[in-house]
Image (cartoon, helix red, strand yellow):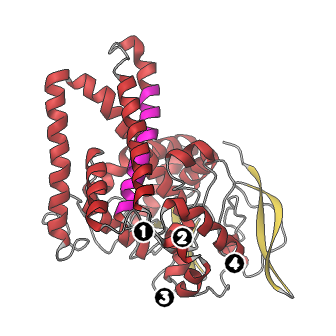
Amino acid sequence: MGAAIAPTRCIVKGRTGWTRRTRHVCGVAAPPRQQTAGTSDDFEDVLRSGLDGVALVHDKPFPSHAEVLRTIPKHCMEKNTAKSMAYAATSVALTLACLAAGHLIPLKLAFLPVWMAYAAVTGTVATGCWVIAHECGHGAFSDNAFLQDAVGFVLHSALLVPYFSWQRSHAIHHARTNHMTEGETHVPHVAGTKPGDGSKKRKERMGEPVYTVVRLVTHLVFGWPAYILFGATGGPKYGTTNHFWPYEPFSGKLFPGKWKQKVLVSAAGVLAMVGALTWWAKTAGIVSVMALYGGPVIVTNFWLVLYTWLQHTDVDIPHFDKDNWTFIKGAFHTVDRPYGPVLDFLHHRIGSTHVAHHVNSTIPHYNAVEATNALKEKYPEYYLHDPTPIHKALWRVASKCIAVEKKGNMYVFT
């Protein structure tokens, strides 16, 4: 796949401080350029995304979390239960409308292309329900805690997601974003280790195009179940985890104390949904259930993994060890990307306002644009937005982001 040419900005240090300058850069390989202030020769062989190495500026003094929070207008943190419920109702209504339309499609092999289109559309629409439940898990939906958890529990269980289990593991992801040893989800392998070198050897043996396609399939189709069942891509701190059973043979370290009981409650919710699906299959047939429900759920999981992967990974997005990591550094190494107006509407801007979400995850999505604009205005040298089209960014990440090695005070992909 060819390199994506996109305008971006680089940080340069002048007499008046840090500034960004717009320039055209290659979306994959680093072109000849004047060295960015704060980088070193250690990073000259690091590939570049549409960020053009902005995140590799390693000697910037990062502000404190409190300083950054003061930048965001206080009303952005205020939750409006009626508005949140309206957005939830919209996502549910759109999903049910798609499901109703699916009942009009004949269950015949000749209609397989139509069923594939149905799965793509319905799964994409249902991701809005996933995002609303995600907001509930962060406490960004309502000040009414019972209502908030009830909405999140029902929506996530309907999509076979263990609500409280994921709430806990996702909170760890936010608390340790881009942390090499304590991070949770999409923690990269280290070059020189068995997993890291094994991935590189597979790429050499298969060739980059085939390897990339295989990696996209394994991540986007099987990545979510692999994570909730076995903790795949989680960091080394918690071991092999399971979001349905926090006891042996799995590690229970991710779910201490009362969280173990909440994991079992979450499992019961998913089990109830499985029971409902089983009853549906007995009355309508398993093929009908797989077509109307199974296909869309796979697509919803696809979007979940895609968003999370691209929010925290790219060829020039570093990770940090415990001696060089801070919360705000992790938050500011989150990347906003251009998903377009349709996906922004359906998915409540989860991919285009994610930096603000990591600065403060209790900001409701309908206030996230204003919060994002405040961060961009106050901290243009820290805020990251990659203009690369999503399909090109996804190919770049899948083909190039294999393993990291430490250079300076960062871990970067090699």
> How packed is label 4: few (under 14 Cα within 10 Å), some, or many (20 or more)?
few
In the image, the segment drawn in magenta is 117-136
Using the image, tell me which numbered label, if any, was put on residue 400: none
Which secondary structure lies at badge 2? helix
Tell me whether the residue at label 3 lies in contact with that at label 2, contact meaning CB atoms closer than 8 angstroms: no
Question: Looking at the image, which residue is at 72% across and 70% down?
Answer: 44
Check if mark 4's residue and mark 1's residue have beta carbons within 8 Å. Answer: no
Rendering coords of residue 333 (x, y %): 57, 71
Looking at the picture, which amino acid does disc 4 mark? Lys
Horizontal and vertical percent position of residue 49: 68, 59
Q: Pointers 4 and 2 in contact (CB under 8 A)?
A: no
Residue 284 visible, this orientation: yes
The answer to if 194 sits in the magenta stretch is: no
Please give the residue where the numbered disc 2 appears in the rendered image: 76
Q: In which quarter of the image is residue 362?
A: bottom left
Query: Label 2 sits on what residue type?
Result: Cys
Residue that label 4 marks: 378
Q: Is residue 45 left or right of residue 308?
A: right
Question: Total label count?
Answer: 4
Q: Distance between the residues labelled 1 and 3?
A: 21 Å
Q: Considering only order in the chain, which callout, 2 or 4, is on the residue closer to the N terminus?
A: 2
For label 3, the residue is 323
**For mark 1, what is the residue?**
193
Q: Distance between the residues labelled 1 and 2?
A: 44 Å
Distance (Cα) linking label 4 and label 1: 40 Å
Q: Looking at numbered disc 1 in the image, what kind of residue is underneath it?
A: Thr
**Circle nearer the viewer, 1 or 3:** 3
Lower position in the chain sequence, tag 3 or tag 4: 3
Contact between labelled residues 4 and 3, with CB atoms less than 8 Å apart: no
Q: Which residue is at a point 58% across and 55% down the rendered structure image?
A: 400
